[in-house]
Each structure stands twice: as structure tokens, then as C-alpha cells.
Image: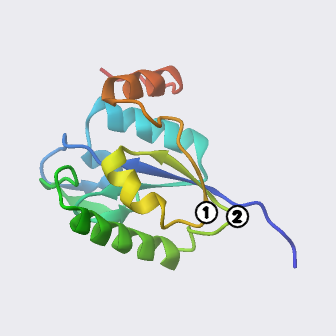
Amino acid sequence: MISMAGKVIALVGCVKSKQAGRHEARDLYDSALFKCSRAYAEANSDEWFILSAKYGLVRPEEQIDSYEDTLIGKTPMAKQEWARRVHKKMQDLGLDDPENTVLWLAGRDVKLPLAFMLICRQRDPLDGLMQAPRLAWLKANTKVEVS
């Protein structure tokens, strides 16, 4: 059997700021933080997905409707249920593999309930940073112009 190096899978957190209507997930979220996270994910991963509070694990090209939902303030049980759904989908897609590395580009409310379930390696360049320092770091490490 030939051993192959794993993939880097970026997980980008959803944000509150969205366009109205139905869009490809990559274009639904319109904040500077999301746009910079997307640019970083596209440049530094083999594949990337959005972690949506409503839809779970979403491919960037997937069509989804705008929504008002967040994991912030949800009960620990609700966050765990969300994480189980996301983890199951990751397993179904073969993403949670010990050879793969998850690149976290999501806040703590999204990351914490899911991170301990994963068997793949994990890397979080934004760990411990609040929103403004996250955005500053991403702007400094991407070539995207956002306001």
C-alpha cells in the first residue's frame, strides 16, 4: 500500500453578517472577517468548508438560504448536538482522518465542541485571539483587500 500525505482541511466559521436570500455559501457571508478567513483558507488548504450554526458543515459551493442563528449563548447540550452532526458529516466525507490536518479559522463557540471529537491533526493560527486581532492577523497574512 502506498502511503500518501494527508490533506489540509480548513474550517471557516460562519458570521452574523450575511446577504439576504439564497447564495453559494462562499458568497453568503459578507463580513471582512469571513472574507479574509476564506482567502486564507483558499490559499493554505487543499479543501475548505464553512461551519454554519444552522446548516452544520457546508461546502463553499453549496446553495444555502440566509439565516439568523448562532452557537453563541446556546446550551452545552445544543453545541454538542451540533458538533456531533458536523463530525458525522466529516466522517462521511473522509475528512476526519489521522493523516489530515484541520486548519481552524473559527471562533471558540464553534471550535470547542467539535475539536475534541476529531482524530485528525489540528492547527489554529488564531487561537486565543479576539475578533479584531483575528482580522488583523488574517489581513496581514492574506492578499485580499477588504474594508
63 or 52: nearer the viewer: 52
**Percent of width and height locating residue 16:** 19, 43
User: In the image, what residue type sits under mark 2?
Assistant: Glu
Left or right of 57 on screen, residue 74: left
Q: Residue furthest front?
A: 76
Disc 1 crowd rating (10 Å Cα; few below 14, some 14-19, many 20+) is: some
Where residue 10 sits in the image (x, y, percent)? Answer: 51, 51
Q: For numbered disc 2, what is the local secondary structure? A: loop
In the picture, the quarter occupied by the N terminus is bottom right
Please indicate, yes or no, whether residue 61 appears anywhere in the rendered image.
Answer: no
Quadrant showing the C terminus = top left
The residue under the point 51% across, 75% down is 91
Q: Which residue is mark 1?
A: 120
Residues tagged 2 and 1 counted as in contact (Cβ below 8 A)? yes
Q: Which mark is residue 91?
A: none
Q: At 57% across and 39% down in the image, what residue appears?
A: 43
The tag earlier along the polypeptide, 2 or 1, is 2
Disc 1 element: loop
Vertical position of residue 92 compared to residue 106: above or below: below
Q: Say which of 43 and 109 sits in front.
A: 109
- Real-space Cα separation, disc 2 to disc 1, in angstroms: 6 Å
Q: How is the image coloured?
A: rainbow
Q: Residue at x 27, y 63 (%)?
A: 79
- The numbered disc on residue 99 is 2
Residue 132: image quadrant is top left
Neighbor class of circle 2 (other Cα within 10 Å; few <14, some 14-19, many 20+) is some
